[in-house]
Amino acid sequence: MRHLSIAVASTLILATSAMAAGKRETVQHASQPAPAKWAKEPDGFLGIKFSELFPQLPDCPRSSLGVVDFQQINQLPGLCFDGTSRSSYGHLWNLPKLGFSYSVTVMIAVGSPIDFTLTTSVDNYDDLVKVLIDRYGQPTSRTKGTVKTKVGAEFDNESLEWIGTRVSISLDKRRDSIDTSAVSIMDREYWKTKLDQQQREAAAGASKL
């Protein structure tokens, strides 16, 4: 999951750089409109802000069998956290109702959230797109393509991106498997710093070859 988030974040950072280059070109060619500012850019997800410490959410209750007890969870007034560590990764439950089932995971670093990933069945993809556009506005980009399974079966795919100054959102119709749609809401500054650090380390390593 962490490697996937870095890959997704890297793609969005590169896309943002390309947009910035396009904006510089717009200065030279006034006839081209500048990219519109993302008016509905969020500062977090589910009321949890990227720039703040991860809140002290209650632990999700578990049944006598040791599994998450969703019957008890539904009685809670808000979100709960289920994970082995509040300093790295976990699931959030008792989520807002969207009209379809879904789950959310959160990645945490230095005490603050850096990535939220929502996953659902690909059957809910169109409903998920509508929810995201209603909440965040039209995406910065929308691309269509295909994905292949290991046995060569081909399926349609689509990717939507919202790229802001602080936050990036990436939605894939099919991610990790042909049956799963996923959207990642990321702290763009954190992942940019992380990518820059990895590039410096790679360059330093290459110089020692």
Image (cartoon, helix red, strand yellow):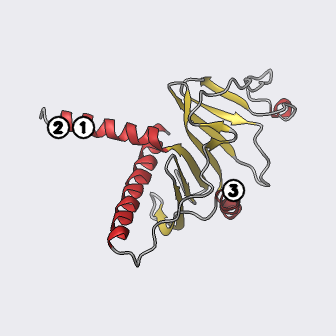
Q: Quick one: SS at disc 2?
A: helix
Q: Position of residue 97 (x, y in %)?
A: 80, 48
User: In front: mark 3 or mark 2?
Assistant: 3
Q: Name the residue under label 2.
A: 206
Percent coordinates x, y for residue 38 in the rendering:
56, 58
In front here: 72 or 65? 72
Mark with earlier residue (3, 1): 3
Q: Which amino acid does label 3 sit on?
A: Arg
Q: Position of residue 75 (x, y in %)?
A: 87, 32
Measuring 45% from the left and 38% from the top, which residue is drawn there?
Answer: 190
Q: Are marks 2 and 1 in contact (CB under 8 Å)?
A: yes
Residue type, label 2: Ala
Front label number (3 vs 1): 3
Kind of element beneath mark 1: helix
Q: How crowded is mark 1: few (under 14 residues within 10 Å), some or many (20 or more)?
A: few
C-alpha span from label 3 to label 1: 38 Å
Q: Position of residue 177 (x, y in %)?
A: 54, 53
What residue is shown with label 1?
A: 202
Q: How far apart are marks 2 and 1 (CA)?
A: 6 Å
Q: Is residue 203 left or right of residue 90?
A: left
**Observer able to see residue 144:** yes
